[in-house]
Each structure stands twice: as C-alpha cells, then as structure tokens.
Image (spheres, helix red, strand yellow):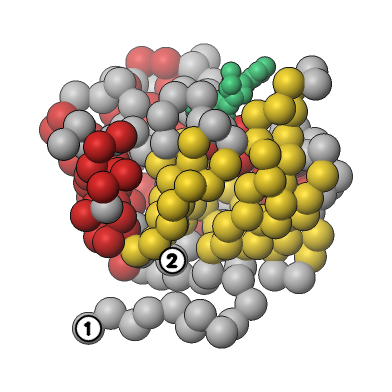
Amino acid sequence: MQARPDRASTPLLAVEDLHVSYGGVPALYGLSFEVHAGEVVALVGANGAGKSTTLRAISGLIPPDSGSIRLDDRQLNRMPPHAIAALGIAHVPEGRRIFSRLSVLQNLLLGSYARTARSTEQQTLEEVLTLFPRLRERLHQPAGTLSGGEQQMLAIGRGLMLRPRLLMLDEPSLGLAPLIVEGIFDVVRTLSASGMTILLIEQNVQETLMLAHRAYVLQVGQIVATGAGVDLLQSDLVRRAYLGL
Ligand SMILES: Nc1ncnc2c1ncn2[C@@H]1O[C@H](COP(=O)(O)OP(=O)(O)O)[C@@H](O)[C@H]1O
Ligand SMILES: [Mg+2]
C-alpha cells in the first residue's frame, strides 16, 4: 500500500489567490492550489485555461499582479527565474525548448548550472542517462537530430539535472505518437515511485487522472474542481468536458 502524503504538513508548494495578466488582459483570476512533497498533482483544462501561465508564474517568468507563491515558507513572488530554479523548481516548458545545435550532453549540463546541483552533477547525469538510455547512446549528437520523443526525454532530463524538489512538466506528450506517449507516462510513474514531487499538465486527461494523486480542473483562469485523480475521473464535469462522455 502506498503511503499518502501527510495532509497536516506544510505543502511544498502553495499558490494562493494568484492573479496574472498579459498586457492588462487577465489570464488567472485568483488561483489557489497546493502540492505536497511526494505527490503528483495534475492541472487539467482546455486550451487557454491558464495552465502554462500558472507554471510560468511559479518559475518567475511572468510577474503575478497579486497573490502568493511559496516554496515551503519562502515567498517566491518577484524572485528572478534563476533564483527560483536554484531553490529546486525545474520547469520543463511546453514545446521542449531544447538547444538544437548543442549536443545532448551540453543540453543536459545546462540543467545543472545552479551551484547546488553542480556538486552532484556527475552522479545526477548517470541517473538521468540510466532513466533515458536513448540519451546515453546519443550523448554527443546535436540535440536537433533527435526524434520528438527523444527531445522530450532530453527536456525532462535537463530538468532532472537540477535535482529538483519540484518538477513541473508542461504537456510532455504533446505531438508524440501513442507508443512514445506511453513511454513518457512510464517515466512520470517511475519518477513518482522514486519520490519525486511533480506538477503535471497534460491534455491526455484520462491517463493523467489515473496517475495523479490529486488534480485541479482549470477553466478560464479559475479552479472549478479538485480531488483525487481517480475521483475526478468519475465526476460529471470531467466526463462531459474532457472525456466527451
Ligand atoms: N504571451 C502571451 N501574451 C498574451 N496572452 C497570452 C500569452 N500567453 C498566454 N496568453 C493568454 O492567457 C490565457 C491562458 O493561456 P495559457 O496559460 O497558455 O493556457 P493553457 O496552457 O491552459 O492552454 C489565454 O487566454 C492565452 O491566450
Ligand atoms: Mg499551455
């Protein structure tokens, strides 16, 4: 039986009443949610609901208008992205954003630039290459020569090089063939089993809710439902809006 996170403890990540806008146009209207250590928490919602914006605000890429984002008890608002990464938040963005002319190895090492990660770099690299044997075979190849699935693995591997306390994955399976998508979900399950805390965004709602300990459903910048992944899977809202049932 799997141990459940202790609900009474301080969450690892706590987002409270977060408001974010782009050029005065609101994208998030008072978002609140939390992630406890060891959990996989999913954010699900239609295109444009504000999922990526949420991750960008957490990693410091866009400044919130108001609200708070805390890692343990530390306020992250207004901290620059490199400082937030150094605290242990890895953001694997939508669309992978790998450097196609750099080698696989160079891309991975970009993930461990934080001083805290550098001391364990060789060991972490070994772990990442064990998780992704395809990357080991292609270590000195330009990243642009990898397949889509391999590029996604590289993007996740680069995030792991930080030895993150929280790994945020934005649509890791987007645009990949079904068999490769399965491989990505396997990786998420393996990381979760090893105790990694994961904030996951996925369009693949059914499989995501089966995997996630808890999930939040976003609609137009607000959370409209939350619960255990398997419970949400049974809810009318999710069945109608996301599973087409
Ligand atoms: N760079 C941007 N500039 C202006 N508006 C944006 C930008 N990125 C996202 N938005 C808007 O913010 C809202 C939320 O977008 P996003 O967070 O990308 O949604 P999701 O990831 O759930 O598809 C949408 O209305 C989108 O059009
Ligand atoms: Mg998005």
Q: Nearer the viewer, residue 233 or 109?
A: 233
Relative to 245, residue 146 above or below = above
Q: Quadrant of the C terminus?
A: top left
Q: Quadrant of ligand 1?
A: top right
Identify the residue position indicated by label 1 in the image.
1
Give the mark count: 2
Q: Secondary structure at mark 2?
A: loop
> Looking at mark 1, is its residue's CB closer than 8 Å to ligand 1?
no
Say whether residue 230 is left or right of residue 98. left
Identify the residue position indicated by label 2 in the image.
39
Q: Residue at x 61, y 68 (%)?
A: 12
Q: Is residue 97 visible?
A: yes
Which kind of residue does numbered mark 1 sit on? Met
Say whether residue 118 is left or right of residue 51. right
Task: Report how far apart the C-alphas of labels 1 and 2 lie in the structure.
Answer: 15 Å
Q: Quadrant of the N terminus?
A: bottom left
Which kind of residue does numbered mark 2 sit on? Glu
Q: How far across and how far down the image is residue 82, in percent?
A: 76, 43
Relative to 76, residue 169 above or below = above
